[in-house]
């Protein structure tokens, strides 16, 4: 998304976009964007950007990364293919982002441009999402009002701009207007006849037939049908059919067909003229039924597509006009209105009494409200007798009428708790939006008395979160509170701290004075920690003689004072029974989120600081330092994260694809890709293979990881082969640990069988140094792999121990020259000679050569002159995520 302001030449004739986009429009949009806290940009009918987005650099980067040009083009194209809708909203993967477009049309509803609106819903932003501070944000309700305002302003603006251009055309159109007037009169006469049918008491089938007959005689189509989805939701039937001539029937051919076999039965409208390019599914359907053109419009019932109006030409070609489509859309709306009225009339009378009898016996309180008119439509007897105190009833009804789920006081199940303070009771209210018997949208509230549950929960919660000896919070509560405080500190960009306190030589007191005295000391320590920590700071017993304090960000300024008080407390003797004894402590301190963004890492680092304090002679305090623990903790973190990722079915390991191009073709087309693993860990972030693969090999975890990568790569290649690129191959690397396992052949076979890939399109890569370690074993293993039909590639050639000596004995299909020989190609004679020699040797052995690491145009030109078979490197493309690779190379 380019944000620089450019003055584009306005193009088009009268009634088009000429003069439509001006500096005045830019100023208007800037003012609206700032006042409504949204982002806007306009594209003309050729998808050329005509206005600039009002945003600073950080906000612009955010918009570019989320509202990509492909997403904007997708929204723009929906207006090009749909001249009915003027506002289209597209859902975003991030639920807090809102994305919609407004069509700019002339009187003929020709698309002159699209106004794109991008916004952030401040009510839906998760706590763990960080947004640029200058980013505009609004609410869904405000966006709706802004959209309506922009619709009206854009309509007025376009109308005013086009008015002057249309004055000239009006003179030329005077001779045409008479004919158009006559057509309009004819259209109105037919539509009047159709509207009269709405009052008919005939059944829907007879009414549909009459509507089709009148429509067909006016629009002059060959066949019109109304199809409906059967009760099994699988097959389709013809409700009514009209044909201009005998023999031009379509209904009996489609009746009984499965919905999935009818390409237009998707819930979307289709307008297909004879010259329109159409997908294969429509082409086959049209040829089978001798259809030359068609208009297919969905008829909705309760937001569900249950019927279709089908208008077709059977034989004679036809280009549908805008007037044809407008008229038939009006016809569809008439049929839809008739259908809705019939359903409501037949069901409304009995629905209320049936519903009432059900709701009176559901065992809970039920109330139905019309929030728009602040009216209670229904309440059962349980609700009417539930609360006797007038103040409690007033508060509950106020909550019911004013409750808004977007205020953040409910969870994802739309539930909220209410406390009746006078009656000392608790209720749980569940809010759902439903359709009432008369089809209007209402709120259904079910209310349960949860007083006993709340009282029991409080007792259980106290027992579950409290240490029974000291009455301090326990470790479970500590971890929960710490996680919440860390999230809060991250969200507010503040800092808190954790103290971990361990009693020095507590075992001597237990062994020398007895466990009861030891327990007495623990209770005294707990009381002192509560006393010195002060309000807002909680103390916890997290182990036998281990305590913790959480200093929230709101109390961070008191941290030094609290630590000094604790040190002073332990410098004095403890009175236990009739005697006094000294017991000191060691303390480790960590800061969050600086020293860790989760409870586990903070405790790990705090324990390390605590050990350092004890090493320093006890009765000491040590602050954790990022440089103090070195690599062991980082390695332990990565090892734990690796094991967790593998246990979670390797979902965190993402497969990237780097294209391999044909070096013998001057266009250098893509021939396939090498599959490369990346690790995106939720705690450690994005980790490159060089950082985790050696550890995974050491731990033996590379086997399940490699199995996952191979299966995913085979699945994608099979997909590429099925969708237009049967020539694409995928290269998968095998590590030494995988090759040394007895089941590597079974792993490859499983990947082939599960994915359905053609084995000829799978290339397994082994490094030269690995292959040279046990040549005989590798020869047997690679021969067995070749029997399955796969190809074998020798990777990193030139870096191993034996180089050319054993090439002829290995069952190889591809040699990949290491990138270390490529960097100086064209400038270093040895590099040129090496690549040329290997390439010539490979030709004599009927083996292909891949040169990897190509990053510069100089290297590419030299390799092309050498007629190298295949080339790979950043000059052509970097390793890409699956979706990005397919977007660029699967066309």
Image (cartoon, rainbow, N blue to C red):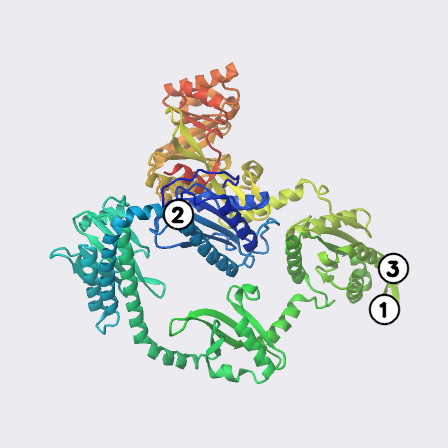
**Residue 562 visible in the displayed image:** yes
Give the quadrant of residue 673: top left
Instruction: Name which of mark 2 and mark 1 comes first in the sequence.
Output: 2
Pick the front one: 815 or 148: 148
Q: Secondary structure at mark 3?
A: loop
The dot on residue 882 is none
Q: Is residue 503 left or right of residue 867?
A: right
* Residue under numbered circle 2: 164
Above or below, 400 relative to 835: below
Above or below, 571 relative to 110: below
Query: Do the CB atoms of the residues marked 3 and 1 lie less than 8 Å apart?
Result: no
Residue found farthest to the top: 829
* Residue under numbered circle 1: 577
Pick the front one: 213 or 741: 213
Instruction: Name which of mark 2 and mark 3 comes first in the sequence.
Output: 2
- Residue at coordinates 56% horizontally, 73% vertically from top-left? 399
* Residue under numbered circle 3: 572
Residue 46 screen position, x and y as percent: 39, 41
């Amino acid at each position: 998304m380019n944000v620089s302001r450019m003055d584009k030449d306005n193009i088009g004739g009268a009634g088009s976009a000429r003069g439509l986009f001006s500096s005045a429009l830019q100023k208007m949009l800037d003012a609206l964007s700032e006042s409504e806290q949204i982002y806007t940009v306009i594209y003309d009918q050729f998808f050329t950007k005509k206005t600039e987005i009002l945003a600073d650099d950080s906000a612009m980067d955010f918009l570019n990364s989320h509202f990509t040009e492909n997403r904007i083009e997708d929204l723009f194209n929906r207006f090009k293919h749909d001249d009915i809708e003027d506002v289209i909203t597209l859902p975003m993967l991030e639920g807090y982002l809102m994305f919609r477009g407004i069509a700019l049309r002339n009187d003929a509803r020709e698309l002159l441009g699209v106004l794109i609106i991008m916004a952030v819903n401040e009510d839906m932003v998760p706590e763990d999402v960080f947004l640029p501070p200058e980013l505009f944000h609004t609410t869904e309700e405000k966006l709706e009002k802004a959209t309506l305002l922009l619709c009206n302003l854009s309509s007025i603006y376009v109308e005013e701009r086009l008015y002057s251009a249309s004055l000239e055309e009006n003179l030329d159109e005077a001779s045409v207007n008479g004919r158009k007037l006559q057509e309009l009169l004819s259209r109105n006469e037919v539509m009047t006849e159709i509207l009269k049918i709405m009052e008919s008491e005939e059944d829907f089938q007879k009414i549909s037939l009459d509507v089709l007959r009148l429509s067909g005689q006016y629009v002059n189509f060959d066949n019109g049908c109304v199809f409906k989805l059967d009760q099994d939701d699988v097959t389709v039937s013809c409700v009514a059919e009209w044909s201009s001539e005998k023999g031009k029937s379509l209904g009996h051919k489609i009746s009984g067909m499965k919905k999935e076999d009818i390409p237009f039965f998707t819930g979307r409208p289709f307008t297909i003229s004879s010259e329109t390019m159409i997908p294969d599914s429509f082409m086959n359907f049209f040829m089978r039924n001798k259809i030359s053109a068609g208009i297919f419009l969905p008829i909705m019932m309760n937001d569900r597509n249950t019927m279709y109006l089908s208008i077709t030409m059977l034989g004679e070609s036809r280009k549908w006009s805008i007037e044809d489509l407008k008229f038939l859309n009006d016809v569809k709306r008439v049929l839809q209105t008739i259908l809705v009225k019939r359903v409501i009339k037949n069901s409304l009378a009995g629905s209320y009494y049936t519903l009432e009898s059900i709701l009176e016996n559901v065992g809970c309180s039920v109330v139905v409200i019309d929030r728009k008119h602040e009216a209670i439509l229904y309440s059962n007897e349980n609700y009417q007798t539930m609360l006797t105190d007038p103040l409690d009833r007033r508060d509950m009804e106020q909550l019911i009428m004013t409750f808004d789920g977007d205020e953040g006081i409910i969870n994802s199940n739309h539930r909220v708790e209410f406390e009746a303070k006078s009656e000392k009771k608790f209720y749980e209210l569940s809010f759902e939006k439903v359709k009432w018997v008369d089809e209007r949208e209402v709120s259904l509230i079910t209310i349960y008395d949860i007083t006993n549950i709340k009282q029991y929960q409080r007792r259980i919660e106290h027992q579950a979160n409290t240490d029974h000896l000291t009455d301090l919070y326990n470790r479970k509560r500590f971890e929960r509170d710490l996680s919440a405080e860390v999230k809060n500190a991250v969200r507010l960009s503040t800092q808190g701290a954790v103290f971990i306190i361990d009693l020095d030589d507590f075992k001597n007191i237990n062994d020398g004075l007895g466990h009861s005295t030891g327990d007495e000391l623990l209770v005294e320590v707990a009381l002192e920690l509560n006393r010195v920590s002060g309000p807002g700071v909680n103390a916890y017993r997290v182990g036998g003689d281990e305590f913790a304090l959480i200093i929230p960000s709101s109390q961070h300024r008191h941290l030094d004072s609290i630590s000094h008080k604790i040190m002073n407390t332990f410098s004095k003797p403890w009175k236990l029974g009739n005697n006094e004894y000294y017991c000191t402590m060691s303390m480790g301190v960590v800061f969050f989120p600086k020293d860790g963004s989760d409870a586990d890492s903070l405790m790990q680092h705090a324990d390390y600081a605590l050990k350092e304090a004890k090493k320093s002679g006890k009765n000491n305090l040590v602050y954790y330092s990022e440089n103090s623990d070195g690599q062991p903790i980082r390695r332990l973190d990565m090892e734990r994260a690796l094991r967790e990722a593998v246990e979670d079915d390797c979902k965190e390991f993402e497969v990237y694809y780097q294209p391999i191009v044909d070096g013998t073709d001057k266009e250098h087309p893509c021939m396939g890709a090498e599959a490369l693993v990346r690790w995106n860990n939720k705690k450690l972030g994005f980790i490159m293979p060089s950082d985790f693969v050696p550890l995974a090999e050491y731990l033996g975890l590379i086997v399940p990881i490699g199995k996952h990568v191979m299966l995913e790569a085979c699945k994608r290649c099979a997909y590429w082969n099925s969708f237009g690129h049967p020539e694409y191959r995928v290269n998968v690397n095998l590590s030494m640990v995988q090759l040394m396992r007895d089941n590597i052949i079974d792993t490859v076979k499983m990947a082939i069988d599960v994915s359905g890939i053609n084995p000829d399109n799978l290339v397994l890569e082994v490094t030269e140094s690995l292959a040279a370690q046990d040549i005989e074993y590798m020869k047997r293993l690679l021969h067995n792999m070749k029997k399955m039909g796969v190809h074998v590639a020798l990777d990193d050639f030139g870096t191993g121990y034996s180089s050319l000596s054993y090439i002829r004995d290995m069952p190889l299909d591809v040699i990949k020259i290491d990138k270390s020989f490529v960097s100086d190609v064209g400038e270093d004679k040895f590099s040129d000679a090496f690549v040329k020699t290997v390439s010539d040797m490979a030709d004599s052995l009927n083996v292909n050569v891949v040169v990897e690491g190509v990053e510069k145009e100089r290297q590419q030109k030299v390799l092309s002159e050498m007629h190298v078979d295949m080339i790979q490197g950043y000059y052509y493309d970097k390793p890409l995520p699956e979706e990005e690779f397919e977007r660029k190379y699967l066309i």
